[in-house]
Amino acid sequence: MRDIPTLIIGAGQAGLAMSHCLSQRSIEHVLLERGQVANSWRTERWDSLRLLTPNWQSRLPGFTYTGDQPDGFRTMPQTIEFLSGYAQKIDAPVETQTTVLSVEQLPSGYLVKTDRGDWTCRSVLIASGACNIGNIPSCAADLPASVTSLSPLTYRNPDQLPDGNVLVVGASATGVQLASELQRSGRQVTLATGEHVRVPRTYRGRDIKWWMDQTGIMDMTLAEVDDINRARHVPSLQLIGSPTQETISLNSLQALGVQIAGRVMGVMGAEVQFSGSLPNVCSLADLKMNRLLKQIDEWIETQAPEGITEPAYRLRETLVPREPILRLNLQQAGIETVIWATGFKPDYSWLNVPVITPRGELRHKGGVVDAPGMYVLGLPFLRRRKSSLIDGVGDDARDLADHLSHYLKGTLAAAA
């Protein structure tokens, strides 16, 4: 049994950022990682994936991009190298190949059991990620046994799949990227489309992420949001990290030959049923995109940033089939694979502390979990809109490190 003031569970960008902040405050700690540093990036991403954020936006406490392609997009090997380099630079005390089996509350802290021995600590930070499990709807179980059913966590490349056509369910960042890749591989793809957020990759000569950064959209805090639960479940932007700064959308996918349908409503044998709300969903996405572009235009008018010479413009509205697909027989359509790009959820099966909601989410306020000395980092909109991004965990880590430091001092004073 080993004892330490603070344990961090997970050594991805969130855990490493917190490690740096704790070291700055002279708080002894250890990171427990089930695999290697950046394990999820190593083992749970498809081969062609690139970050959706430009290289310049990979900013961690005390560490940032220094290469000659600030507007490029990192591949997965490059992302792993970046995070591994960060761990080395900050000399993070990582215990790799250490799987946390359970966390239990003690009168004065926590007992953390692992497959390499047990720890006690006065505070624990959960940085195990928000995308541990594919959030696959229950109707997936009704698919015929002959149809291959995958989540993006297990998809790697088109060669992995059976030869037939593909149904991709979900049209946020993951879904549109996989639909594009699979259609280009020579398969016929049908994309089931629910609520989504459409944006251009670039606007008026700058990356959309640059605009969102400069205008303060990504720094929006909890206090500025009317419905935080809604904000935490907004779909990811329809973006792709392309070397050519390609804009991906339902229009560009249809130009490739992808068929679009509405949201999956159910599965009955070989037949999939879709919602008829596709036109309304697409109109709403167009409306929200244009509101964002208008906000950027207004910011340009008041701030007059240098180098912005392109005039304002708007993208073509989303093209919707006159008669959207409502029913699709998988066998008749030659569909042999369904990929459920329907989001992700965290895995807290090892957490034996009563802080989990019926929806499987942690009860927390800005990362301060509803248990003494327990924290969480890296979840969507934890404290800011950018909280789940590499660029966002730093600010949250600094805030929580301050809170954790005060907590530890308080427990020491109480014990004195």
Image (cartoon, helix red, strand yellow):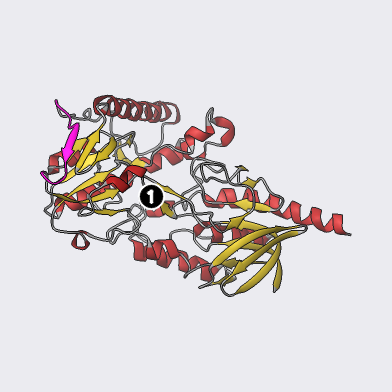
- On the image, the x and y values in percent for residue 78 come to 36, 64
Q: Which of these two is toward me, 274 or 383?
A: 274
- In percent of width and height, residue 96 lies at 52, 72
Residue depicted at x 39% and y 65%? 42
Is residue 277 rendered magenta in the image?
Answer: no
**Can the viewer see residue 68?**
yes
Which structural element holds mark 1?
A: loop
State the count of labels. Answer: 1
Q: Name the amino acid type tagged 1.
A: Thr
Q: Is residue 239 above or below residue 401?
A: above
The furthest residue to the right:
416
Q: With 238 as the anchor, is 63 left or right in this view?
A: right
Quarter of the image with the N terminus is bottom right
Give x and y (percent) for residue 333: 12, 44
| 22 with respect to 334 (left or right) | right
Residue 86 horizontal side relative to residue 144, left or right: right
Q: Main SS of the magenta segment?
A: loop
Taking 43 as reference, is 286 above or below it? Answer: above
Q: Which residue, given by chain and number where applicable, does mark 1 sit on?
A: 53
Q: Does residue 187 lie above or below 280 as drawn?
A: below
Q: Quadrant of the C terminus?
A: bottom right
For image coordinates 77% across by 57% down, the residue present is 107
Is residue 216 visible in the rendered structure shown here?
no
Place of residue 238 in the rendered image (x, y in percent of width and height, measured from the top left): 31, 41
Residue toward you, 326 or 271: 271
Left-right relation of 226 to 255: right
Range shown magenta: 322-332
What crowding class fits label 1: few (fewer than 14 Cα within 10 Å), some (14-19), or many (20 or more)?
many
Look at 22% across and 30% down and name the residue there.
318
Residue 323: within the magenta?
Answer: yes
